Amino acid sequence: RSRAEPEAEAEKNKKSLKRKCLFAVVLAILSALCVTFAVKYGGKRSPSSTSNNESTSTNSEGINSANSYPEAIELVLKGEFGNSIVEALEVAGSHQHRAFVWLTKENTMSGDLQNKHSLVQRFALAIFFLATGGEQWIKKLGFLSSEHECNWNMKVDEQVTDHVYCTTEDFCSSRIHTTPGFTYDFLGVKCLEDNLTVDTLRMYGNNLKGTLPSEISALTSLEYISLWGNTISGPLPSTIGNLSRLRAIYLQDNNLDGSIPDPLWGLRHITDLGLYNNAISGHLSSTMAQLTKLEWLWIDSNRLNSTIPREIGEMTNLVRLGLFNNSFYGTIPSEIGNLHSLEELDIGLNDLSSILPTEIGNLHNLTYLSCHSNDITGHIPSELGNTNLREVELFDLGLSGTIPSELGKVESLVSLDIYLNWLTGTIPSEIGQLTNLESLTLFMNKLSGTLPLEMSNMVALRTLMMSSNALSGSFPSSFSNLELLGEDLFVPKVYTLSITVLSLFMAYFARVLHFIFIALRSNLVPTTWFYLSATQTGSLLQTQV
C-alpha cells in the first residue's frame, strides 16, 4: 500500500499537467484568432495616429484618448469633402496629408473638436498655404499659427485697390469694392460678416506659387478673392463653382492656364472677374450670360480662341469689357449694342473680321472703344457720333470710305487713332469742333485735300500725325504747340505730305513705338511688332513711291 500511494499521486499529477497544456493550447489558438480578426476587421488607422500608450483623457464630446483625435477629425473632413479626401490623406507628403498632420497636432494639444466649422476652414486654408508655396510667401500673415483663422492677416500702410484699369497713362479707372466694412489696408484672411466665417481672401503680390487647390471650395462663404500679381499656375479648379456667394475674383497677372471652368459661369452674384495676363485657353462659353450681375470682365492677354458669343448682349450690367490680345475670331456680335451700361470696350489685337456693327452707336455711356489690329473692314459707323467717347482706337484695320463728319459731334473726344487703314476723301471740317481733342493720328491712309480751316479751333491738340497720305497745303499758325506732326514728327512751317520711302519707314517706326508702349503697359510682347500688312505696304510702294 505504501508503494501504491506514490504511484497514484504521480498518475494524478500527470493528468493535471495534460489538462493545463491543453488549456494553454486552446487559449493560444483563441488569442491568435482574436488578433487576426482585429487586424482584418478593425479598420484603417488615421494617417497621423501613433501606437504609444498615452494616458487617457475625456473631452466635451466623449472622446477618450489622445489617439482618437485624428480619427474624429478625419470623420469631420470626410463629411465635408467625401471619400476622396480619405485617399488624399493617405498620400504621405501631399498637401492634404501635411495639412491634416498639422491640424491633428494642433487639436491634440488644444483638445477642441467642438467647432467643426473652424476645423474645416483651417484645413482648407492650410492646404491653400501649402499648395501655393506658403513657405516662400513674402509675408506669412500668421498662417498655420494657433490664432483663429480670421486673424491670419496683417495691416498694410499703403492702400492698393485690386484693379486699376488704364487705357492710357492719363485715363485710369479704379474699381472700389463695396462690401460693408471692407477696406484696402490689409493682406490675408478676413471674416467681415461675423468674425468667425472666412469671407475675404486677399494676398496680391505676395509670391504665391503652385496651384489653387480644389479644397478652397470648402470656404463656402467666400465673397472676395484677390490673388493678383503672383505666379500661380495650373487651371482654375472647377470646384470654384461651389462658392456661390462670390462677388469678386481678381486673379490677373498670374500664370494660370487651362480653360475657364463652366461652373464659374454659374456664380450669379459675381460683379468683378479679372483674369487678364494669364495663359488661359479654350473658348468663351455662351453660358457666361448667366452672370447677369457682372459689371467688370477682364480676360485680356490670354490664349482664348473662339467667337464672341452673341449671348454677351444679355449681360446688360457690364461696364468694362476687356477681350484684348486673344485669338477671338468671327464677327463682332451686334448684340453688343444692348450693353447700355458699357463704358469701356476693348477687343483689339484679335482675329475678328467683318465690319464694325452700327449698334455700337447705341452705347451712349461708352467712353473708350478699341478694336485695333483685327481684320475688320467696311466704313467707320457714323453712329459713333451718338456716343460720349473719349478715346477711339480703330487703327491697323481694313477700314475704307471717308471719315464720318458725325465724329465732330463727339465733343468729349480726347484721342482719335484711325491710322493704318484705307480711308479716302478729305478731312471733314466738322473735326474742328473737337475742342478737347489732344491727339489725332491719321497717317498711312489715302486721305487727300487740305486741312480744313476749322481745325484751328482745336486748341487742346498736342499730337498730330498725318504722314503717308496725299495731303497738301500749310499748317495753321495755331498748331505751333504740337509735339508730333507730319513725316518728320516735328513741327514744320510748311508741309507736303506726299508718300515717300522715308515716310513709310517713319510710319512703321511710329507704329513700333506705339506697340512698345502697349507692351510696357500690358506686360506682353505683341506678335504684330514686326510686320506690316503686306497688301497695304505693297500697294503703297507700287502706286505712290
Image (tube, grey):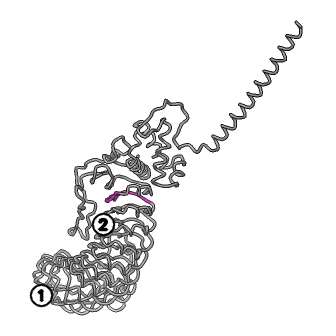
In this view, the residue in front, 400 or 113, is 113
Counting from the top left corner in percent of width and height, residue 359 is at 28, 86
Q: Say which amino acid is labelled 2.
A: Asp
Q: Main secondary structure of the magenta part?
A: loop
Q: Is residue 50 left or right of residue 107?
A: right
Q: Say which amino acid is labelled 1.
A: Glu
| One can see residue 119 in this view | yes
Secondary element at image label 1: helix
Q: Is residue 5 left or right of residue 91?
A: right
The magenta stretch spans residue 109: no
The residue wearing badge 1 is: 454
Counting from the top left corner in percent of width and height, residue 131 is at 44, 52
Pair 1/2: label in front: 2
The residue wearing badge 2 is: 272
Considering the image in quadrants, where does the C terminus appear?
Answer: bottom left
Task: Name which of mark 1 and mark 2 comes first in the sequence.
Answer: 2
Q: CA distance from mark 1 to mark 2?
A: 43 Å
Counting from the top left corner in percent of width and height, residue 263 is at 42, 67
Question: Residue 245, located in which quarter of the rendered image?
Answer: bottom left
Q: Is residue 209 left or right of residue 224?
A: right
Residue 12 higher or lower than 401, as above or below: above
| One can see residue 503 in this view | no
Within 10 Å of disc 2 (Cα), the crowding (few <14, some 14-19, many 20+) is: many
> Which residue sits at x=34%, y=65%?
523
Within 10 Å of disc 1 (Cα), the crowding (few <14, some 14-19, many 20+) is: some
Q: In the image, which residues are magenta?
A: 221-233
Residue, far top = 2
